Amino acid sequence: MDNICAIATPYGKGAISIIRCSGKDSINLVNKIFKGKDLTKAKTNTISYGHIIDNNEIIDEVLVSVFRSPHSYDGENSCEINCHGGVYVTNLVLETLLKHGFRLAEPGEFTKRAFLNHKMDLTSAESVMDIVNAESKLALKSSLNALNSHLHNLIAKLREKILNILAEIEVNIDYPEYDDAVVVTHDYLIPHLNDLILEMENILANSKISRIIINGVKTAIVGKPNVGKSTILNMLLGENKAIVSDIAGTTRDIVEGHIRLGDISLNLLDTAGIRDDSDYIESIGIAKAKETIKEADLILLVLDLSRDLSQDDLNLIDLIKDKSHLLIANKSDLSPKWHRDDVLVISAKNNDGLLELKDKIYEILKINDFNVNNPTLNNIRQKQLMEDSLKSLKEALNSCLNYSDISLIEIDIKEAFDSLGEITGETYPEELITALFTKFCLGK
């Protein structure tokens, strides 16, 4: 592989900047512009003091860490140059490297090399960016579990069980004369497939909470016009981001906000009021609101406690019944006109009920039930592949129940095995790897 380099620390002024270098000749190339200890003789995992020079001119005073293959992040020979943190001096050191045999690394290229050099599997590689982006203790712990191969080991055990089934089928087909081989019948396969299906369903159920903790909860605040949606958004955010007005239809688009709620993030969406009678511009916002409801992880449906429930209110309650949702009765500071046991009563205007609202959100999302030590699927790619594998096993089970030919059932079982392999990178299309690592930041 050729020699690459990139700034690994955030862009801007700071105490230090780190420039990461990797490649077969990276240590030799850095040594040519380094005045200090001979880096080519430095032991792995050591750090040396000196200066970066170009045309006999000192560029910066630095510390250079040396990591020799295979004992490095990406399995290649590599160096990390710790220079002063100014934007100009950091770029000057980077330009010097580019003049002396390096090229600028692509986003995620260091981690891609780590994967290709078998230093980590795809689940561990994906967890690297999850760790970088973690905003809570639970999100960090869940990502660290994946980095430490907990998910890899879970997938490996599932694949081993499926592989044993496939091996037994193959022995039956190719060597039917073996008397000591297990006779693979439909009745033999059914309990094995049922156990695998149940195990995968449990993994998918547990992983839903993990993805919420890591990626945040897409939360839609919906309701009729003028029920206090924007006031609730501002109450949660602690700032006046949404326009609050007594005029119905003030919010004509989707207003977004982001808050930390203990161990989770809420990506809040304040939508246009939903009603049947509206002008053309407002109707566009209403259409967006209905689309947001479909995509949201959590619906906060706001109802006006000071007005009788209308048919529009009841229609909205019915619309969200199959989604994770919370019914909020707002305006408790006014005379109540109705009562329901399944609502949370608040006054957004007076900031009453904020703590109860946060507790209810935790309860609905079952955050307190999450065991951070259990391996989970932490992104959509992993979830989709697990669902593909599960679908194949269910098709195999259905074929067993219908007494289809064992050799045809084997095809579905093999597809389940391959889908699981894509999660960890045991089997993967080249375009997947390219697309996955381009989402990483530079220097990773």
Image (cartoon, rainbow, N blue to C red):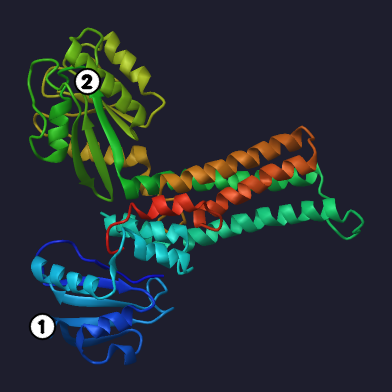
Out of 376 and 152, give the one closest to the viewer: 152
Name the residue located 36 percent from the left edge and 48 percent from the top edge.
Answer: 368
Looking at the image, residue 337 lies above or below residue 94: above
Q: Position of residue 27 (x, y in %)?
A: 32, 82
Q: Quadrant of residue 235?
A: top left
* Residue 148 in sight in this render: no
Of the 4 image quadrants, the one containing the N terminus is bottom left
Q: Residue at coordinates 77% horizontally, 32% vertically from top-left?
A: 402
| Residue 370 percent across, percent down from the top left | 40, 50
Secondary structure under badge 1?
A: strand
Viewer-nearest residue: 384 or 323: 384
To which residue does mark 2 refer?
Answer: 285
Q: Quadrant of residue 9?
A: bottom left
Question: Mark 2 belongs to which amino acid?
Answer: Gly
Cα distance, mark 1 to mark 2? 60 Å
- Compared to residue 27, the image places residue 18 above or below, namely above
| Residue linked to disc 1 | 58
Q: Residues within 10 Å of mark 1 (few under 14, many from 20)?
A: few
Residue 233, compared with residue 190, is above or below; it is above
Q: Quadrant of the C terminus?
A: bottom left
Residue kind at label 1, given as amino acid type: Ile
